Image (cartoon, rainbow, N blue to C red):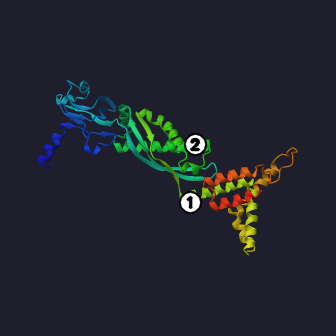
Amino acid sequence: MGLFDTIKGEAKRNFIARADEAKGEIIYKYPEKNIRMLTQLTVDADEIALFVKDGKVEGKLGPGRHTLDTSNIPFLSRLLEKFTGGNLFISEVFFVSTREHPGVKFGGPIGDVRDPETGLGIGTMVYGDFSIRVTEPEKLVVGLVGMGRSSNDDFLGWFKNQVLKVMRDRIAELLVKKRWPLLDVTSGAYTEEIEAEVLTGLKPHVDNYGLTVVRMGNFHVSIKEEDEATLKKFSKDAAYSRMAGGFQQYAQGQAMLGASEGMAKGGGGTDGALQGMGMGMGMGMAQMFMNQNQQMQQQRPPAPAAEPAPAGGGDTRTPAQRLKELHELHKAGVLSDDEYNAKRAELMKLL
């Protein structure tokens, strides 16, 4: 280092302020601890300067330009080094921004969550941003120093982990308690509800550090494309099953329909029957459900005599009601236009 650099460095030590490259940071730690008396300290309008020694905040200064002298700043006397003759004091100086900081990005895996509609465990991710504000700078600095996290990057890394942890816990809890289909969650249908739950869940984690998450930004819960396709297929199958009055009736009806179509095309009926299943779960899955249904019926105690069930396998819905459900499935995107028109034509014949 040349003479000019030495002089320049010494001159800088006479002025303390947030570095230009750190203007957008929530917390900035001044790199020097040995501070000369009569040094000029500049605090911006949207921040506060804290003097910390041995993990304790000894004093703070608000916005403005301050001359560091014990005559006008009494708490500095507690920081003096006696052997320097009162010309030097030792302290960590933190600049903490008190304005709202929007657009803090976060993201990562939530983990496997179980979809209430299908019972499948699906790997889930979340990405987005949030807005944060420091309400009690002293709590923040003392808490971070105690954890050994005194830089802005350390602080944000820790805080983003808190957001992700609460997001993971709350989404899993909501899926269980509210029985929200995972496809609805990933579509953004419950964004406002999730935001409210996450903000509430974060509060006890951040209150002790003098922080407030003002709002969540554009966050999105996502799953892999292949998992989304699987969920849509299973949801469609479940919807068909409900309309047909049960899985067994639906599977049998689709098999018969496929067989007749195959025979009409000269395919002998076998290929048409397999295609007519349209279930994505295969004949083996259908047989499993049928076996389970038979076992459950065998284990049930004898039921009291009842009135004969109406025709149609016990389905008491009128054709008009089934048309309404069909319209809702089509509107929700579960049924394609061709599937909707075909099923609608069948039901119209019953009116």
**Residue, disc 2:** 174
Which image quadrant is residue 291 in? bottom right
Q: Is residue 248 left or right of residue 303?
A: left
Number of the label disc, if any, that sits on residue 226 = 1
Q: Which quarter shows the C terminus? A: bottom right
Q: Dot 2, how many residues are within 10 Å of its Cα: few (below 14), some (14-19), or many (20+)?
A: some
**Whole-Å distance between the Cαs marked 2 and 1?**
23 Å
Identity of the residue drawn at 66% across and 53% down: 327
Q: Secondary structure at mark 1?
A: helix
Q: Provide residue 348's location: percent of width, then percent of height.
A: 73, 57
Tell me whether the residue at label 2 lies in contact with that at label 1, contact meaning CB atoms closer than 8 angstroms: no
Give the residue furthest to the left.
3
Identity of the residue drawn at 82% across and 53% down: 311
Q: Provide residue 188's location: percent of width, then percent of height.
A: 53, 48
Q: Dot 1, how many residues are within 10 Å of its Cα: few (below 14), some (14-19), or many (20+)?
A: few
Sequence-earlier tag: 2 or 1: 2
Query: From this viewpoint, is residue 118 visible?
Result: no
Q: Eyeballing the image, is 171 above or below 207? A: below
Which is nearer the eye, 280 or 157? 280
Query: From this viewpoint, is residue 199 visible?
Result: yes
Q: Provide residue 212's location: percent of width, then percent of height.
A: 42, 35
Number of the label disc, if any, that sits on residue 270 = none
Q: Is residue 12 left or right of residue 132?
A: left
Q: Provide residue 198's location: percent of width, then percent of height.
A: 50, 40
Give the residue furthest to the bottom.
266
Which is nearer the eye, 321 or 175? 321
Q: Amino acid at mark 1?
A: Glu
Q: Amino acid at mark 2?
A: Leu
Q: Secondary structure at mark 2?
A: helix
